Image (cartoon, rainbow, N blue to C red):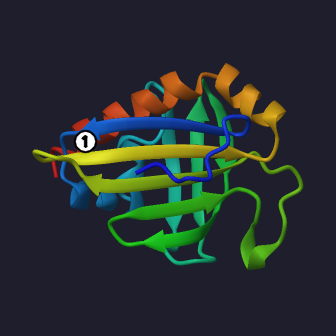
Amino acid sequence: MLPANLDPQTDLVLERRLKAPRAAIWACWTQPAHIPQFFVPRPNRVTACAIDLRVGGHFNTTFDVGGTEMQNTGTYLEVVPLEKLVFTDAYGKDWKPAPDPFMTAILLLADAPGGGTQYTAIARHRSPETCEQHKAMGFHEGWGIVADQLDAYALTL
């Protein structure tokens, strides 16, 4: 399920088998009402979310992290229903380049053998230094917590 073009210098990968069905995981990632339920590790929280689910559409979130508000804007590069989402902070509205992009996210979903969802999240960075920074920030732990929160929430749908 992993893309052949992964680069260990610039790509971070999290793979999980989730118990929730793929349709529920897809709904969580594509409907704004669901994003606050899983998208950042608790006790941090999402305070706003806007999604325009199409290539060139936006994926914008606002977080409260320890009392500090953080804006996260993104643009969808690829949308394959129930299978793949690719979004990046490298572009804003009308494909305007961002001044300091951090990463592109690639989410891959497939039916897992025996039920559930094979979930793959890839964070692709523009440089080895940015990748290493994200790794040091706790990519695997943080994105792992998010995957666990996602699975637990999706099972309630």
Q: Is residue 97 left or right of residue 121?
A: right
Q: Quadrant of residue 93?
A: bottom right
Q: Is residue 153 above or below residue 28?
A: above
- Residue 115 in percent (x, y) is at 12, 47
Using the rendered image of the protein, determine whether residue 32 is visible from the camera's viewpoint. no
Q: Position of residue 127 (x, y in %)?
A: 82, 41
Q: Is residue 1 above or below residue 52?
A: above
Residue positioned 47% across, 35% down in the render: 14
In the picture shown, does residue 88 fall above or below 58? above
Is residue 43 something one can see in this rendering? yes
- The residue carrying pointer 1 sits among few (fewer than 14), some (14 to 19) or many (20 or more) residues within 10 Å by Cα, namely some
Q: Farthest front residue?
A: 4
Q: In the displayed structure, does residue 17 sit left or right of residue 79?
A: left
Residue type at mark 1 is Tyr
Residue depicted at 62% across the width and 27% down the height: 67
Please name whichever residue, 78 or 71, is drawn nearer the observer in this view of the structure: 78
Q: Residue 144 vs residue 125: left or right?
A: left
Where residue 22 sits, quadrant-wise, is bottom left
- Identify residue for label 1: 153
Residue at x 55%, y 53% (from the top left corner)? 4
The single residue placed furthest to the left in the displayed view is 114
Residue reaching furthest to the right? 99
Residue 39, quarter of picture: top left
Name the residue at 36% across, 58% down.
33
Label 1 secondary element: helix
The picture places residue 63, in percent across and down from the top left corner, at: 58, 41
Count of number-bearing discs: 1
Task: Provide residue 99's location: percent of width, then percent of height.
Answer: 89, 55
